[in-house]
Image (spheres, helix red, strand yellow):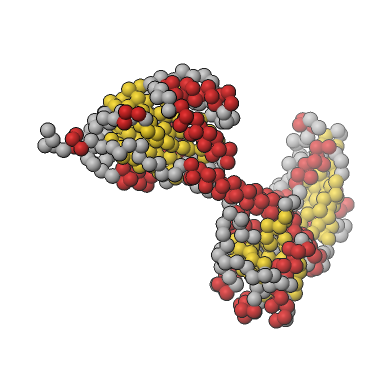
Amino acid sequence: MPADAYADSPVPFDPRTLAALLDGTTAGVGVLDTKLRYLYVNPALERLNGIPAAEHLGRTVAEVLPGVDAREDMMRAVLADGKPREITSSGFTAAAATVRRYWHGAYHRLEIGGRIVGLAGIVMEVMASDKGQRELEQARRHLTLLDTAAARIGTTLDMDTTCAELVDLVVPGLADIATVEVFPPDVAPQVRPAPPGVLRLRRAALQAVPGLRDELHAFGLTGEYIDYQEGAAVQRCLAASRPVVENLTTDEQLLRSAPGPERLAAYRALGMHSAVIVPLTVRSGPLGILGLIRAGDSPVFADEDVVIARELAGRAAVDLDHARRYAHEHTIALELQRSLLSEPRPPHPHIELATRYLPADRSVMVGGDWFDIIPLRDGRHLNAMGDVMGHGMEAAVAMSHYRSLLRMLADEELPPHRILEQLDRMVERSGPDRAATCLLAVVDRSGTACEVASAGHLPPVLIDPRAGARVCDEVTVGPPLGTGFGGYRTTLLEFEPDAVLFLYTDGLVERRGEDIDVSVGRLKELTIPVGGSLDALLDEVLERFGPGAEDDIAVLASRTRNPAARTPDAT
């Protein structure tokens, strides 16, 4: 309907005529203009709303009845297409401020002379019983739980966080106490073996309504292992892969639901009277259970509660499975990376070394950071620092491949840029399908110079005990390895005998929202005293720059021992 079809001028009918026709009817009748402002209200609607007719006029439905879901969107639809609609609404009015009421209305568009002048509505109150109202409210709460589950559960790839999100969602909407218990991970050894016939789970999350939180210590602690005897509700739930509902009215029933008799007094103190145990199951098998408990004056669980609990458990199980798979792969990749980055031995007796590897937070998959120190002939040694792009198991395996190829090429005594060229070609032709950055530094025996080449890596830092630190940004940066572009160059760096060569990966300096040059520039603030400990230097570096890192960090510091250069009276 075109906008100009709506009447902007006062409606061409007399409210006194409407009053003569409609004041006597028992149904509530209202006439609205095209902006849904009241033009007329009959006495029956005045009584339904609990507001005098004069206070309606000139105001919209939402302004007159702010506590009512009046469905103005549906009214506008009637104005737009002219199709009559029946609308059900509910809410609170001044006539009964503490009781939710329900109305059924029929709405028609009013047209005079081809112009749309407003809307007429005939409203009747629907008298819902107390039981019906409770059921409607319960259905509304259940729908709200399901609507919000997707946004509130599975926000991270951490299992315990996901479990905590689940119990926080269902308390108090579905239960007075909620717990999630999961099977211990395969990669972590259990505290003690479970006896035969006993099911052992780890309590990952626990929540209760405020009135019961002070008593939860008797229920058990988050993180502890719980043994369930044969025949317990949890065992029966997982065996049948279906919810188990129990009324806990007798001590025998409480004992059957509890892990052991020592919990009976605690359960009684909490006032538990009904429980639902719901399996957390995915296609590959069960992950654990969701336990819901009601206590005190709360009603027992109804069939609808069990249906909602099962739906929520099914959704949460998918998120838990993702988190479990991530934790498994993260642990294996981390162990693989650590084994490959075991503390290297000094390549020559006159070389001092220190290395550190700091994995990223568990919310980030382990990366492909790596370093190596390779002894060369004539007392020289090769320092290497690299970072395979990507994360996870594939990155850790690719890192191992790069490291092996580099060790093979280092035996050929090539300058750093030639090593990178050959490594780039080998990887591009048949190596891992992951690019990597790499920095090579061949340090001479005297410890006063090194040849450096970079494949997309950040520049090294030279830390002089007297002159301070400088970022060696004169090093030419070529493309990352694995691209096949080549074009690497070797840069000669000269320094004092007791200077420290410091290499690092980008996790040390990259910060969201900050230019990388600014971050790298802060490394100029690094200091070390004459003869200072390299281990102490790296500890200070990680303490200062490690917090807030979003990626793995690998750092390496090396220095050539030169007693003559450090002794003032040496001849």
Query: Is residue 157 in sight in this rendering?
Result: no
Q: Quadrant of residue 271?
A: bottom right
Residue 94 picture location, percent across and down: 70, 61
Q: Quadrant of the C terminus?
A: top left
Name the residue at 85% across, 46% down: 85
Q: Quadrant of residue 77?
A: top right
Residue 216 picture location, percent across and down: 58, 71
Name the residue at 46% across, 37% down: 370
Name the residue at 79% across, 45% down: 74
Q: Quadrant of residue 99?
A: bottom right
For the image, the number of numbered tags is: 0
Question: Who is closer to the viewer here, 137 or 372?
Answer: 372
Question: Who is closer to the viewer here, 269 or 364?
Answer: 364
In the figure, 216 relative to 387: above or below? below
Question: Who is closer to the viewer here, 463 or 526?
Answer: 463
Q: Quadrant of the N terminus?
A: top right
In the figure, 448 relative to 160: above or below? above
Residue 212 picture location, percent across and down: 60, 72
Query: Is residue 374 in sight in this rendering?
Result: yes
In the figure, 533 relative to 452: above or below? below
Question: Who is closer to the viewer here, 163 or 326?
Answer: 326
Residue 297 picture location, percent across and down: 69, 75
In the figure, 550 relative to 287: above or below? above
Name the residue at 58% across, 23% down: 429
- Whether residue 67 sits left or right of residue 403 in the image: it is right
- Whether residue 545 sits left or right of residue 6 in the image: it is left
